[in-house]
Image (cartoon, rainbow, N blue to C red):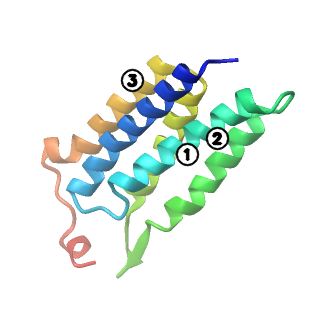
Amino acid sequence: MIGNVEIVIRLLVSAIIGALVGYEREHYHEPAGLRTHMLVCVGATLITLVSVYGIPGGDPTRIAAAIITGIGFLGAGTIIMGRGNVKGLTTAASLWTVSGIGLAIGAGFYIGSLVASVLVLIILELNRFLKLKEPPEMKDL
């Protein structure tokens, strides 16, 4: 069993990481931003904590699988298709990844979650750093 301080630390770390990724998405006016990413990350962390420590004899892997599946539905809501183009896939992927980071934090896997968070932020900024352009029709959506 873990103590209350550790629970609070995990939830706070989760909120901070979700905020960092969400801020990047919100800054560029993507469908899911700061609050959505924070809620997904904190929710995944809390559900992981409950499944690992709050249900004696429970199977945390089943809970983790359910989180990943559920986030797929949330991510689908961020995807917009129009004029033969798809927009929002990166935001859907960032939501899915943030849920995985939340799972890792809930399980106490801090190093992996922090490294994954840094990688996510680098990946999300990669297009802008390389100055890759979206096709003009994508901006019309």
How far apart in space, not on screen, are marks 3 and 1 (Cα)? Answer: 20 Å
Q: Amino acid at mark 3?
A: Val
Report whether residue 94 is seen.
Answer: no
Question: Toward the viewer: 4 or 75?
Answer: 4
Q: Amino acid at mark 1?
A: Gly
Q: Amino acid at mark 2?
A: Ile
Residue 58: % across, % down: 83, 32
Mark in front: 3 vs 2: 2
Residue on which disc 3 sits = 115
Q: Residue at x 38, y 32 (%)?
A: 117
Q: Which mark is residue 47?
A: 2
How far apart in space, not on screen, are marks 3 and 2 (Cα)? Answer: 22 Å
**Quadrant of the image for the C terminus?**
bottom left
Dot 1 alpha-carbon crowd within 10 angstroms: few under 14, some 14 to 19, many 20 or more: many
Q: Secondary structure at mark 3?
A: helix
How far apart in space, not on screen, are marks 1 and 2 (Cα)? Answer: 6 Å
122 is higher (above) or lower (below) than 80: above
Q: Residue at x 16, y 47 (%)?
A: 128
In this picture, residue 45 sits left or right of residue 90: right
Residue on which disc 1 sits = 43
Which tag, 3 or 1, sits closer to the chain's start?
1
In this picture, residue 47 sits left or right of residue 109: right
Question: Toward the viewer: 135 or 20?
Answer: 20
In this picture, residue 56 sits left or right of residue 102: right
